[in-house]
Image (cartoon, helix red, strand yellow):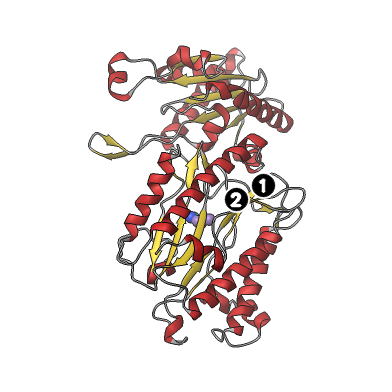
Amino acid sequence: MCTHHGETYARRRAAFFDALAAASPSAVAVMASAPVFVRNNDVEHEYRQDSDFFYLTGFDEPESVAVLDAVTRKMTLFVRARDREREVWDGPRAGVDGARALHGADEAFAIGELDDKLPGLLQGHRRVVYRLGVSRANDDRLLRAIDRVRARARAGASAPTEIVEPGVVLHEMRLRKSPAEIETMRTGARITREAHELAMRRARPQMHEFEVEALLLDTFRRHGSERPAYGSIVGSGPNACVLHYRKNDRRMAEGDLLLIDAGCEYGYYASDVTRTFPIGRAFSREQQAIYELVLEAQLEGIAATRPGATIDEIHKLTVDGITRGLVRLGLLAGEPEELVKTEAYKRFYMHRTSHWLGMDVHDVGGYFEAGKPRPLEPGMVLTVEPGIYIAPDDDTVPPAWRGIGVRIEDDVLVTTSAPDVLTAGIPKTVEELRHACGG
Ligand code: GLY
Ligand code: MN
Ligand code: MN
């Protein structure tokens, strides 16, 4: 896959080598592919490559290991050997030759040779950059290889003395998106927009939530998305208040709110969008009041998504706005500042406002720097997704408010100037929703 994108991966590896070399005079990185997960008997879950591994290699086959030497700046790939019989069942493999010719490996070997070759590749390096704890089997293999280098010490070999987490360097790289990555994310956002618009047009009373989910998945796939970026949430009525609702099996009724949190994965990048709209008729007065409050907070959060601001500040803005609004509507009683301080608002707004977005839906990258929330920089992408959820059995509020759940979520790119909403254009104002909804 992606031979024409080989340049991209070579450039990323060059930047990775630069960063490793800057931190240590002699580093070698060992990166492993994602494992295959067995579903049952001889059936496997759909395979998806590990994001870190794919980011540096563009190689999408399982049972692969990349050794990236920051001194020689060479990549050695260990891959599944060609196997005529297996390939009849599972499809073609790049093999050792393909790893070199198509995937930019300076050297390539069959994965079966890893234990033999790894000590030689580690020897003479002080630092091994490797993520411990993900796979105990891989950890053991690496430690055995280091042990074998130590055994050669009397013959003059110097063995690594440090094992260092790759994320420190790699996740900082992934956090700042290149123009090519942003273009890919824009394409994913366009597909996600199509899916949400179709769901709005088609959702009607008496339909099941899963029928709407099917429309979303169909749209993703028809436009070339590999898969949803996470399990789609299609929650109607009281289910809109279940933050990680996944059953999607309820029959919708007229007057329900439908909360759809769904985004496609495209070219290994996630989109993550939530829209909430009424089924079969206009918002009720209470639904609309909550909706407009969430929307106002979300727009304020988006407007604040600028260089130098922090995710904490964006969260504080949306919390303040929502708390003031809940007091205005009579759903919370007291001074807004006090209700924020005592976290009384958490009864209705219990999650964070933002997370990084990229190859993974909850993407990598630190949220703090030296214990303080880190300032945003151009090239970072995050979600802004406030919500209000009034439990169906909350008898502290009048019945008309109970069971209302609203979240509005967009994907926002930080730029040197105004925030760039990648998922802009998906109907969001009350007026836009009125036009977009078919039921
Ligand atoms: N869909 C996961 C999230 O919004 O964070
Ligand atoms: Mn979401
Ligand atoms: Mn999200």
Q: Quadrant of the C terminus?
A: bottom left
- Crowding near pointer 2: few (<14 within 10 Å), some, many (20+)? many
For image coordinates 59% across by 43% down, the residue present is 186
Report the residue marked by disc 2: 356
| Horizontal and vertical percent position of residue 344 | 57, 79
Report the residue at 50% width, 21% height from top. 148
Cα separation, mark 2 vs mark 1, equals: 8 Å
Q: Is residue 436 above or below residue 92?
A: below
| Kind of residue indicated by mark 2 | Trp
**Nearest the eye: 94 or 294:** 294
Secondary structure state at the residue bearing disc 1: loop
Location of residue 331 by image quarter: bottom right
Labels 2 and 1 touching (C-beta < 8 A) = yes
Residue 335's place in the image compared with 376, above or below, is below
- Front residue of this view, candidates 226 and 108: 226
Residue with the mark numbered 1:
380
Residue 151 in view (yes/no): no
Q: Of residues 21 and 5, which is closer to you in this image?
A: 5
